[in-house]
Image (cartoon, grey):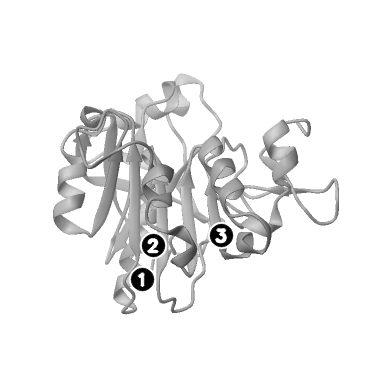
């Protein structure tokens, strides 16, 4: 199976965690993917939907690849309703993954469904002998069923909930900034765009060189051809990068955060 290839994958396992559905596909034994890459999934072409939906890879193992699906529209609702045994049309893995060397103290920050690529990254870092700190922010503890408790039991994860019923009361960034952020050697994040913008405002100047950020974005082609998912680049001034091909992972210094915040580029 080639990188970025189109293939049909059977669902071999499915779990529901509140608003998230974990879907596990059976894939070729040679399937290789890295944290931060995504699957581009065709969600119900029989219902007239022709554009694929991107889903960050949550995990891969021998002969399997999994994603987390959060219902946000008819396409994701269709995918969340599929049952074990059904064949799903996929492309992938696509996109630019996270990159890392061996850091003393990496921090991983997830907002909501942004936990998917960071769990994948967390596992890879641990397999390299690293000890990453993972911060996950959720709005309400009940939104994700028993997933927070499951993750807490398996990983060294610090959870922040805005209702305060699980872990730290507040947001993922409030939890992170309470832990002396200047002591972390590198920072990786995935979540809503507002969270990423706020993070870059905390990590200003040269400190942005320590950031890698995975963007959640609607995509059409998934391979950089249609230019429908561009974000403003810092160099050269006025230029753009595509989230699907140049990303979805970017270094903090690559993007023009002033234009991103003002949205004047759209």
Circle 3 — which element?
strand
CA distance for labels 2 and 3 = 14 Å
Indicate which label's residue lies in the foreground, 2 or 3: 3
Q: Nearer the viewer, residue 143 or 5?
A: 143
Q: Which residue is mark 1?
A: 125
**The image quarter in which residue 194 lies:** top right
Looking at the rendering, in which quadrant would you find the C terminus? top right
Looking at the rendering, in which quadrant would you find the N terminus? bottom left
**Disc on res. 167:** none
Look at 21% across and 35% down and name the residue there.
17
Q: Earlier in the sequence, mark 1 or mark 3?
A: 1
Circle 2 — which element?
helix
Q: Residues within 10 Å of mark 1 (few under 14, many from 20)?
A: some
Q: Nearer the viewer, residue 93 or 166?
A: 166
CA distance for labels 1 and 2 = 6 Å
- Tags 1 and 2 touching, CB below 8 Å: yes
Q: Residues within 10 Å of mark 2 (few under 14, many from 20)?
A: many
Look at 68% across and 58% down and name the residue there.
205
**The image quarter in which residue 124 lies:** bottom left
Q: Which residue is mark 2?
A: 121
Residue 43 seen in the figure: yes
Residue 179: x, y in percent?
37, 56
CA distance for labels 1 and 3 = 16 Å
Q: Which residue is mark 3?
A: 211
């Amino acid at each position: 199976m080639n990188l970025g290839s189109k293939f049909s994958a059977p669902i071999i396992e499915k779990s529901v965690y509140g608003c998230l559905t974990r879907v596990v596909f059976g894939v070729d034994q040679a399937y290789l993917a890295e944290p931060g890459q995504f699957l581009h999934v065709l969600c119900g072409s029989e219902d007239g939907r022709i554009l694929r939906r991107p889903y960050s890879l949550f995990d891969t193992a021998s002969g399997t690849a999994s994603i987390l699906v959060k219902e946000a529209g008819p396409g994701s609702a269709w995918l969340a309703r599929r049952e074990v045994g059904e064949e799903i049309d996929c492309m992938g893995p696509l996109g630019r993954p996270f990159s890392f060397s061996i850091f003393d103290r990496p921090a991983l920050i997830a907002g909501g469904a942004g936990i998917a690529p960071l769990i994948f990254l967390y596992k890879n870092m641990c397999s390299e002998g690293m000890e990453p700190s993972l911060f996950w922010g959720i709005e309400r503890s009940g939104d994700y069923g028993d997933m927070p408790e499951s993750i807490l039991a398996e990983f060294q994860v610090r959870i922040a909930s805005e209702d305060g019923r699980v872990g730290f009361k507040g947001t993922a960034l409030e939890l992170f900034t309470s832990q002396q952020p200047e002591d972390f050697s590198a920072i990786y994040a995935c979540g809503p765009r507002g969270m990423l913008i706020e993070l870059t405002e905390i990590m200003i100047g040269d400190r942005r060189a320590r950031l890698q950020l995975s963007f959640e974005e609607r995509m059409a082609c998934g391979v950089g051809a249609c230019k429908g998912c561009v974000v403003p680049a810092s160099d050269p001034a006025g230029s753009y990068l595509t989230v699907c091909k140049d990303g979805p992972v970017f270094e903090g210094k690559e993007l023009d955060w002033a234009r991103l915040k003002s949205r004047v580029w759209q």
